[in-house]
Image (cartoon, helix red, strand yellow):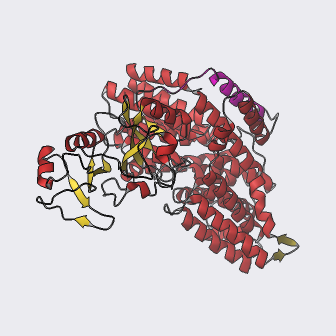
Amino acid sequence: MQPITADAHGYAVLLLTAVALFLFTRDRIPLETSSLAVLIALVAGFQLFPYSRDDVSLRAVDFFAGFGNEALVAICALMIVGKGLETTGALQPLASIVGRAWSTRPVLALFFTLIAAAVLSAFMNNTPIVVLLMPILVGVSLRAKFPVSGVMLPMGLATIIGGMSTTIGTSTNLLVVGISHDLGVHQFGMFDFVLPAFIVGGVGILFLWLIAPRLLPDRIPPMADTMPRIFNSQLNIQEDSFAAGKTLSELLAKTHGEMRVDKIQRTETLFLAKLPSVVLLPGDRLFVKDSPENLKRFESLLGATLYNISDSEHPIDEETPLTASGQQLAEVVITRGSPLHLRTLATAAFSASYGLIPLAIHRARSPHTQVAGDFMTIRLRAGDVLLVQGTGDAIDKLKASGTMLVLDGTTDLPHTEKANRALGVMALVVLAAATGLLPISVSALIGVGLILTFGCLTWRDAAGALSAPVIMIIVASLALGKALTVTGMADYLAMGFVNATISMPVPYILSAFILVMTILTNVVSNSAAAVIGTPIAVAIAQQLNVNAEPFILAVLFGANMSYATPYGYQTNLLIMSAGGYKFTDFLRVGIPLTIIMWIGFSLLLPYMYDL
């Protein structure tokens, strides 16, 4: 092997890659912000310090190519087509079949639910599948009296397993396939790696069916009306309320001692001691934590409000009338890509936009901590849950918009006359790509045109289906991958990996590389792991003088194995919040599943490729 050296540009890119991976794990920093910062650093750096080596140059403008990358075009187009399926309720018949099966034979129903989730996720985004199945599982668990926590997490992980089986199963797959093609290594067809995914994934599905439910403790299903989650909220004291002029002890007596007050706020900066003799005045806020039903009962008993009626910025008016008939409570989960993700309710103008009043908040990552200050100014994170109040029409409108996940175990998803059109378009997209008639980027883009032409989506809905965080992290990761490749740092890292494992047989090296990618994807995003890992995988294969295809698949499969943490994949956060899971629950199931999949691919890939 020829010695490979790295230059100053290569080391700078490696340092930036480390910084990027750190930024991608910071929840407080929006993913799109971190991605833009990385892209700016690359563009500015290579503009100020041009790179040229061995007749190879890299200009700042070369990093903009990611915006026109074929894989990114395909990903965006598939997002829109998938949104058409979700909006038209095209999968509702499947939901009905699953619901009936659970009512009769729940053990077999779990198996077929896992299979259905895996198969569907091979052709469309995981999120709408999880959103479709979650309320069904909660509803049947309440009727059949079995713990929903034993089935919801396995269902979510089954969608991740299914997603790794085709080129369009996840954006990660499309990126790996696209980059390998750009590097001139291998052109994967849609079903080229379905066999190893089917064999190893099948073992994983059996684990999720037979063993995973036994590993999970019973958790309270927070989507059930009888077992609600605990929310942080504020009771605002009004002039004409019972609480005005009363002592804290009188208020507690009025609620029969059930209300627990965490703090009393009088002004923006003044908090009162929780003494029994303290007298409450109009304008005071009581910070309390309880279930939605108890919060509304305290509101009624004390004559207080769970909203601030004097707030001029978020007024109660004809569009948000809390006194109108048919008022309902709803729980809204914040998801990645939601209009509220990493924003505050105030900046998003939530009440004015949706005709709903936010009453309380449940923080998924720290559910037992007190929310300080006005929760209208709290930056919301994926997995947080809002308790909102409004008319049934307003809540139904929010559900139909498809922009947020409304937890409701009784309401069916919409099934419109355009559902069959959306299914037909998706079938054409898949068939055209699977038969090689059209590249997936072309067939998916044509699918977008058909979805819009048939009226399955409006332009506004289509634009809303695109996720800025996904687009930006893909572009930034592609730029980093290009910089690592052109500067020779990918070859340098590959040489270091090979030197560290040189005494091992090639199958062991492949196994070690799968493990590295698996650990990386549970820490940072799948896309970042895939884009950075693919050129390194190709370089490792070249250094070993072996077929690069199994090493590329090592990246693809490894980057998809985000089972062990709730933050490894966006649907994991949905499952965590809706199922009432704890972080350790993901470790209980995710670590054994990861080991099973890792060992399976470590044995199967060398056998298939004769390594």
Q: Main secondary structure of the magenta part?
A: helix
Q: Residue at x 47, y 34 (%)?
A: 394
**Is residue 404 magenta-colored?**
no
Residue 231 to residue 80: above or below? below
Front position in the image: 166 or 479: 479
- Furthest toward the right, the residue is 55
Q: How many marks?
A: 0
| Residues shaded magenta | 411-433
Q: Position of residue 207 (x, y in %)?
A: 45, 39
Q: Answer with left or right where residue 290 lies relative to residue 396.
A: left
Quarter of image, res 149 = top left
Q: Is residue 52 visible?
A: yes
Q: Answer with left or right where residue 312 lies relative to residue 607.
A: left
- Furthest toward the front, the residue is 240
Which quadrant holds the N terminus? bottom right
Q: Position of residue 70 (x, y in %)?
A: 77, 49
Q: Position of residue 307 (x, y in %)?
A: 35, 47
Q: Answer with left or right where residue 570 lies relative to residue 324.
A: right
Q: Residue at x 55, y 43 (%)?
A: 160
Q: Is residue 6 visible?
A: no
Q: Position of residue 5 (x, y in %)?
A: 74, 78
Q: Residue at x 71, y 31 (%)?
A: 451
Q: Residue at x 57, y 59 (%)?
A: 31
Residue 261 to residue 213: above or below? below
Residue 333 to residue 540: above or below? above
Front position in the image: 388 or 592: 388
